[in-house]
Image (tube, rainbow, N blue to C red):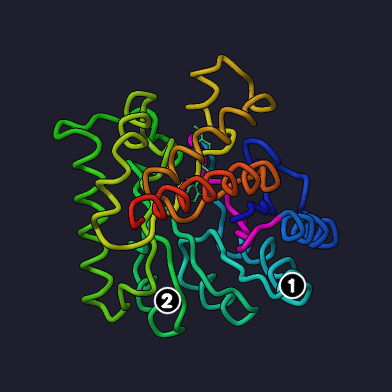
Amino acid sequence: MGILNVTPDSFSDGGDFTDPGRAVAHALQMVAEGAALIDIGGESTRPGATPVPLDEELRRLMPTVSAVAAATDVPISVDTSQPEVIRAVADAGAQLVNDVRALQRPGAVEAVAELGLAASLMHMRGEPGLMQQTSDYPDGVVVTVRDFLAARLANCTAAGLPAERLLLDPGFGFGKTLPDNLALLAALDDLGRLGRPLLVGLSRKSMIGAILDAPVGRRLHGGVAAAVLAVSRGARLVRTHDVAATVEALAVCAAVEAASSEGATA
Ligand code: PT1
């Protein structure tokens, strides 16, 4: 899943793709590099980001969603939490809602269900404005995230959104310390037992920066390593800024996995 931010303030590429023409060119480049999905975001949700009003989110997203949908058959996901935005982008050709708030806004589950879309449910502690001040998991981060995702899955299916249309995401960096993020990555197989494909977003995040003592521009190799480890622990989708590097690393990963499953059946 290649990231296309149409925001002025995203943490690593803010302002680069606010023009639809440049956004489409970048989307097509990611497709050429092997992206199987393009994730378009109009609201930065990284820690400390400020919320965006509905009309501004629509103004940022709509031209780019329509233009990318016209330019490629690769499915489009949109990073949003708002039911009005979900309805508008579905009309413009989006197929998946990537919601860092796990469809908890009133009307979001119903919109996804009615429109026949897929969705990703992510765990976040608190809201982007203050979440780094509230990370504390008395029951342990892995259990807390697992229970949250299980509850959201149950709630969505009860509201008429079939489980077959849902992905789950532990939400790396969303109200989590470095030890929390590492514990989640190490225990990803536990989350896989919830029975839905796992999506992970790790590229260029501060957890990589903290391990390497590296600024955002020097986190490529660490982010690729984290993606490989996530996939080897069961992740099925990787949300990344760095498509070419990630696709190549995961091709090597897949070749080894295929050989080891052949070995198991031989
Ligand atoms: C994610 C994700 C996302 N991450 C999904 N959507 C972001 N499904 C946006 C930092 O610590 O992981 N999964 N949409 C970006 N969020 C962050 C969080 C960016 C933390 C940076 C950090 O640097």
Q: Residue at x 30, y 72 (%)?
A: 163
Magenta segment: 34-47
Mark 1 / mark 2, whichever is N-terminal? 1
In the displayed structure image, the side of residue 31 where residue 235 appears, left or right = left
Residue type of the residue flagged with mark 2: Val
In this rendering, the answer to whether 75 lies above or below 236 is below
Whether residue 37 appears in magenta in the rendering, the answer is yes
Q: Which residue is drawn at 39% across and 62% down?
A: 167
Quarter of the image for the N terminus: give it.
bottom right
For label 1, the residue is 72
Residue at the extreme left of the image, as rendered: 139
**Secondary structure under the numbered disc 1 in the rendered image:** loop
Task: Name which quarter of the figure residue 230 lies in.
Answer: top left
In this rendering, the answer to whether 234 lies above or below 57 is above
How far apart, in angstroms, are the residues tagged by discs 1 and 2?
Answer: 22 Å
Whether residue 150 appears in magenta in the rendering, the answer is no
Quarter of the image for the C terminus: give it.
bottom left
Spot occupied by residue 139 in the image (x, y as percentages of width and height): 14, 35
Residue type of the residue flagged with mark 1: Thr
Task: Name which quarter of the figure residue 9 lies in.
Answer: top right
Residue at the extreme front of the image, as rendered: 266
Spot occupied by residue 114 in the image (x, y as percentages of width and height): 40, 85
- At label 2, counting other C-alpha atoms closer than 10 Å, the crowd grade (few under 14, some 14-19, many 20 or more) is many
Q: Residue at x 42, y 76 (%)?
A: 112
Residue at the extreme top of the image, as rendered: 213
For label 2, the residue is 112
Q: Residue at x 66, y 36 (%)?
A: 12
| Of marks 1 and 2, the one in the foreground | 1
Spot occupied by residue 140 in the image (x, y as percentages of width and height): 19, 33
In this rendering, the answer to whether 26 lies above or below 67 is above
Q: Is the magenta stretch mostly helix, strand or loop?
A: loop
